[in-house]
Amino acid sequence: MIANLPSAARKLAALTLALLLWTGQAQAERIVIDPGHGGTDPGGTGTGMQEKDVVLDTSLRFRDLLEADTADTQGGGSWQVSLTRDTDVFVSLAARSAYANSINADRFMSIHANAFGTASANGTETFSASEGGQSAPLRNLVQEEMIAAWGLTNRGNKTAGFSVLVNTAMPAVLHELAFITNPTDAAKLASPAERQHAAVAHMRALQRHFGIVPYLPGAQPDPESGSLLVVVLDPASLALANAVVSIDGDQVGQSDDSGELLIEALSTGEHLVAVHASNFEDAEQVTDVVANEVGNLVFTLSATPESGNEPPGNSGACDSPSPECSPPGDDGVGGGCSSAGGTSSTGLTLLLLAICLCVSRRKRLAFAAR
Ligand SMILES: [Zn+2]
C-alpha cells in the first residue's frame, strides 16, 4: 500500500492540474467597485443628499447584481467582486488603488456623483486616465449604458488624472452618475429604483466589455424572442459608427464606435434589417431571429459614387472604353457604365449589359490567346 502512494499522489496532482485548467476557462473576473468618499468625507452635498450615501447604495446594488449574475448560470458572466468600502467609513484615495493592486484586480470601477456651485450644471460623465488600453472602451460603455438608463445630459467620455485612475495597475474608470446639486439629476439619485437602474447599467457595461451578451440575473429565457448583433463596416472593413439601423422599417438605433448595435427582445422569425449611413449605399439583409440566441449580422457598406470614398479599381465595370463605359461626364455624374447614375432601373440594366459585354469579350480574348 505504501508503495502505491507516489502513484496515487501523481494521480491526485494530475487531477488537480486538470481541475485548475478546467476552472481557468470559466475564470471569474476580479472586479473592484469603489464607492467614492465615505465617513468624514461626505463628497458633494446638495438637495438634502450626500454623495457618499448615494454612491455607496448604488455600488452595493452593483455588487449584488454581479454576485447574482455569477450565481445564475443561465447567462451573463462570472465575477469576483470586492469593494473599497461597503459601509460609511473613510478610505484614503491611496488605500483604494493600493487595495485593488494588492488583490490583482482585473478592473476598477469608481462611482461618484458630481456637485457644483450653481444648480444649472447637470448630466452624466465618465473618466479614464487616458484614451489607451482597456480603460477607455469600458468607460465608453459605462457612459453609453448610463445615458440609456437615466437619459440625463450626456457630458461625454473624458480623461483625467484622478488618483484612483492613475495609481491603479489595472484598467480603471470613474463614473459621475449625475449632479447632486441639480434638481432633475437629484431626482434620479434620490430614487432607489433609479439607483437600481444605474447598477444594472454598470453591470451591462461590464458584461459587454468582456464580450458577454447583457443579461439580467434571474431573467427567465423567453421562447418568443432573441437578439441580434448588427455590425456595420465601411468598404475597408473598419467599424462604421452612427449608421442608422432599421428593423422591418422601424429605426431601432445607431451603430456605436465599434460599428455595433445590439438589438434585444426581437420576436423570433424573419426580419428585414436595413442600414443607412451618409456617403454609403443603403444595405438590407433578411435574417432569422432564433429564440434565446444572439444572431450576428455584418454589413460591409459600399461608398456612394459621389462620396469620393470609393476604393480604387472599382470605378467602372470594365477597363477599356466602349459606348457603355465612359469617364465622368461634364454634369459631374460619375463615370462607370451607367450614365443615369446607377439608381434608375434603366441605369442598372445598362450596367448589367456592360458587365456582360466586358465579360464575354474577355472570355473571347482569353480563348484567342490559347
Ligand atoms: Zn466624488
Image (cartoon, rainbow, N blue to C red):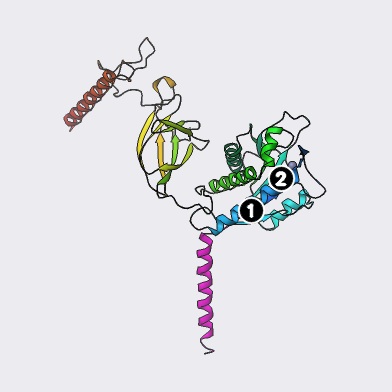
If you read the primary sequence from the N terminus, does the residue marked by circle 1 or circle 2 appear first? 2
Figure check: 162 above or below 277? below
- What residue appears at the point 37 percent right and 17 percent down from the top-left corner? 334
| 149 sits left or right of 84 in the view | left
Q: Is mark 2 within 8 Å of ligand 1?
A: no
Q: Is residue 234 among what the camera can see?
A: no
Q: Which residues are magenta?
A: 1-28
**Residue that label 2 marks:** 54
Type of the residue with mark 1: Arg
- Label 1 sits on a secondary structure element that is helix
**Dominant SS type (magenta):** helix
Check if mark 1's residue and mark 2's residue have beta carbons within 8 Å.
no
Frontmost residue, 278 versus 189 = 189
- What residue appears at the point 72 percent right and 30 percent down from the top-left corner? 121
Graded by Cα atoms within 10 Å as few (under 14), some (14 to 19) or many (20 or more), the crowding at tag 2 reads many
- Picture coordinates of residue 87 (x, y %)? 74, 54
Graded by Cα atoms within 10 Å as few (under 14), some (14 to 19) or many (20 or more), the crowding at tag 1 reads many
- Label 2 sits on a secondary structure element that is helix
How far apart are the two marked residues, 1 and 2, measured between alpha carbons?
14 Å
- Picture coordinates of residue 188 (x, y %)? 66, 39
- Picture coordinates of residue 53 (x, y %)? 74, 47
Which quarter is ligand 1 in? Answer: top right
Q: Is residue 49 among what the camera can see?
A: yes
- What residue appears at the point 48 percent right and 38 percent down from the top-left corner? 260
Instruction: Indicate whether residue 3 is drawn in magenta.
Output: yes
Type of the residue with mark 2: Val
**Residue that label 1 marks:** 63
| 218 sits left or right of 110 in the view | left
